[in-house]
DNA sequence: CGAATGATATACT
DNA sequence: GTATATCATTCGA
């Protein structure tokens, strides 16, 4: 079941980040469909969050999409190398977003490996937000894509993530954000269950 | 551990 | 309009 607009427009980015764990991210390009279970997400809480691109109400050509209503993709290029995929939340005018940091491949894994530029012999190496976007075929030119459309969307497969397996902790790679970097806005599924998927249970 | 890599923001002329 | 510092990272030593 595809998540509806109301999932994204809640006035609680951190809650949305928490609820995204166990949801299924799906992308389609042409006749190729790939999907993966979200296992790690970070909240970026709008203008009050020093780690956010929209901190202090900054608004530029790049960040404009963060000010849209919830339910669109915010994708941008980091380090000149990686496209990072975010989900915009909250209502219009409030630049809240959730960064999807990690997924567990669910379908189309062979296509993901091809997109990574690896030969058949190699596996998916390295997990991180850059790899998520590359494996899923998400490019920063797709920033602003509506998640209720048929290119990128998120489904609820009835997967429940037991709260004991969810770790909340400080975010990664945002040391420059001073005290805001220590906020427990990062949620991820316990490492052991991430590896074999056994931490997930069906409803 | 450290280089790669390029769009973007900001500070200039 | 042009220059340059900056990055929510990754991969190969």
Image (cartoon, coloured by chain):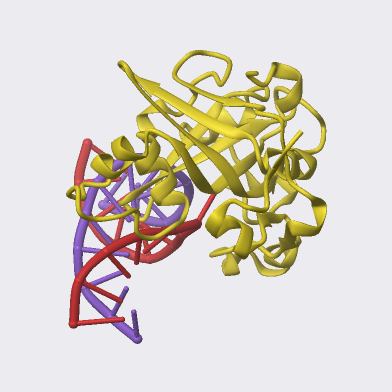
Chain colours: A yellow, B purple, C red
Image quadrant assignment for residue A172: bottom right
Judge left or right: residue A18 versus residue A117: right
Q: Give whichever of A115, A78 is nearer the camera.
A: A115
Residue located 74% across and 29% down the image: A90
Nearer to the camera, A15 or A190: A190
- Toward the top, the furthest residue is A149
Quick check: can you spot residue A88? Answer: yes
Is residue A64 something that shows in the picture?
Answer: no
Residue A66 percent across, percent down from the top left: 60, 32
Where does residue A174 sit, x and y in percent of width and height?
57, 63
Seen from the viewer's position, the closer of residues A149 and A162 is: A162
x and y percent of residue A171 in the render?
Answer: 64, 61
**Callout count:** 0
Q: Position of residue A133 (x, y in %)?
A: 41, 41
For the point 58% across and 67% down, the residue is: A176
**Position of the C terminus of chain A by quadrant:** top right
* Residue depicted at x 21% and y 47%: A117
Foreground of the two, A19 or A130: A19
């Amino acid at each position: 079941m595809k998540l509806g607009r109301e999932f994204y427009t809640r006035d609680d980015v951190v809650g949305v980040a928490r609820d995204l764990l166990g949801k299924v991210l799906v992308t389609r390009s042409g006749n190729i469909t790939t999907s993966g279970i979200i296992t790690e997400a970070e909240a970026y809480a709008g203008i009050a969050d020093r780690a956010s691109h929209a901190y202090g109400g900054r608004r530029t050509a790049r960040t404009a999409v963060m000010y849209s209503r919830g339910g669109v993709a915010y994708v941008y290029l980091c380090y000149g190398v990686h496209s990072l995929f975010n989900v915009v939340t909250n209502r219009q005018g409030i630049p809240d977003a959730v960064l999807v940091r990690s997924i567990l491949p669910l379908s189309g894994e062979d296509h993901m490996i091809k997109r990574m530029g690896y030969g058949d012999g190699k596996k998916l190496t390295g997990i991180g937000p850059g790899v998520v976007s590359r494996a899923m075929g998400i490019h920063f030119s797709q920033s602003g894509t509506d998640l209720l459309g048929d290119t990128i969307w998120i489904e609820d497969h009835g997967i429940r993530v037991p709260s004991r397996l969810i770790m909340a902790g400080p975010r990664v790679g945002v040391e420059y954000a001073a005290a805001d970097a220590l906020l427990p806005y990062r949620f991820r599924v316990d490492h052991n269950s991430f590896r074999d998927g056994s931490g997930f249970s069906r409803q």
